[in-house]
Amino acid sequence: MMRRMLTRAMLAALMVGVPLAAVAAPVGVATGSTASAATCPGQTLNIGPSAATPNLSYPYGIAADASGNILVADGSTNTIYRFDSSGTQTLAIPPTATTPNLSDSLGLALDSAGNIYVVNRDNANVVKFDPSGHPLMTISASAATPNLSEPVGLAVDSAGNIYVGDEGTSAVYRFNPSGTQTLAIASSAGTPALGDPDGLAVDSAGNIYVGNYVGNTINKFNSSGTQVMAIPASAGTPTMSGPSGVAVDALGNIYVGTQDGHAVYVFDSTGTQKFAITSAQATPAFEAPVGIALDPTGNLYVADKYNHNVYRFCTGIVQPSSSTTSTTATTASTSSTAAPASAVAVEPTFTG
């Protein structure tokens, strides 16, 4: 718990909602991509603390919609923010918008209707808001067996099912759209065992991807809760350390944010690393990139809780034009069908 309460001084020169056309040297653009070679692959946006009111202090959960709007949950201000694609704030949901008030609001997700879900960690519940920020539903601690204790990870699939990762029980839960529990994946179901399952993603087949912070792995479970794959720390270069945020795209690629490794990794569907975005390749440099999300076109969004910044990157990986990606703070619920030949990406490389 103490690792969540750490604070650091803000970086001296913070960019505020400024498109970054030359942050990373572009060295490869995916076949058929319409992205400018000036920005892809590379960083295309930074939202600094002062771009938000109140200022960003501990951005953790992140999601993006099809229009490029960016939703951020801040565990310090306990506010949910929405920014447009240029980084301008358009909404703030204050902690007093719900009872009990938001407190340590970390994981964040969106559904296909634009409803906003957030974990209220200190109150051990999950709150659903409409797109304007009005509360619609609360999943209480007692709705889960075992009871929710310290929920952090959050995802919503295309059918509206809600997935919660709980640090206190080290379990992952699935609830139907009305908030009734339909699955619990216990810590012991994972190899290695789940511990602090902070990151969650779900694909269109119902497979569940878990950022296993303590186990230092990404555990993949089928829709019945049986583990079918694990990506170990050693699969990453540099070695993964503290995987927290997870997202999955329409091609089956898996995106991982590491709290302690200061890097974001991209693996293919078999768990083989494609590339990594390291601290030196982000402006300002990553400190703890815990929140990971994708939009339907494949833009990657990152929330860094220690340097108080939000980022957008063009990865150079072209998504199928028919994909409909629902993204969350730690997940992208997507179609996992194979991409057409015209959408196969050239391997992008990020350079500092």
Image (spheres, grey):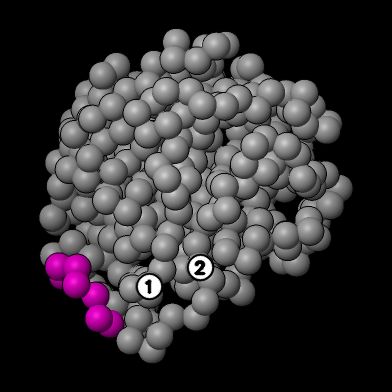
Q: Is residue 72 visible?
A: yes
Q: Is residue 321 above or below residue 185?
A: below
Label 2 is placed on what type of residue? Ser
Identify the disc placed on residue 141: none
Query: Which residue lies at the image location 48% right of the left edge and 73% below the top edge?
Result: 251
Which residue carries the number 2 mark? 335
User: Majority secondary structure of the magenta segment?
Assistant: loop
The image quadrant of residue 242 is top right
- Residue range in magenta is 31-37
Which residue carries the number 1 mark? 322
Q: Position of residue 333 (x, y in %)?
A: 52, 56
Left or right, residue 228 beside residue 216: right
Closer-to-camera residue (279/258): 258
Closer-to-camera residue (92/121): 92
Query: Which residue lies at the image location 33% right of the left edge and 86% below the top edge?
Result: 342
Q: Position of residue 115 (x, y in %)?
A: 44, 38
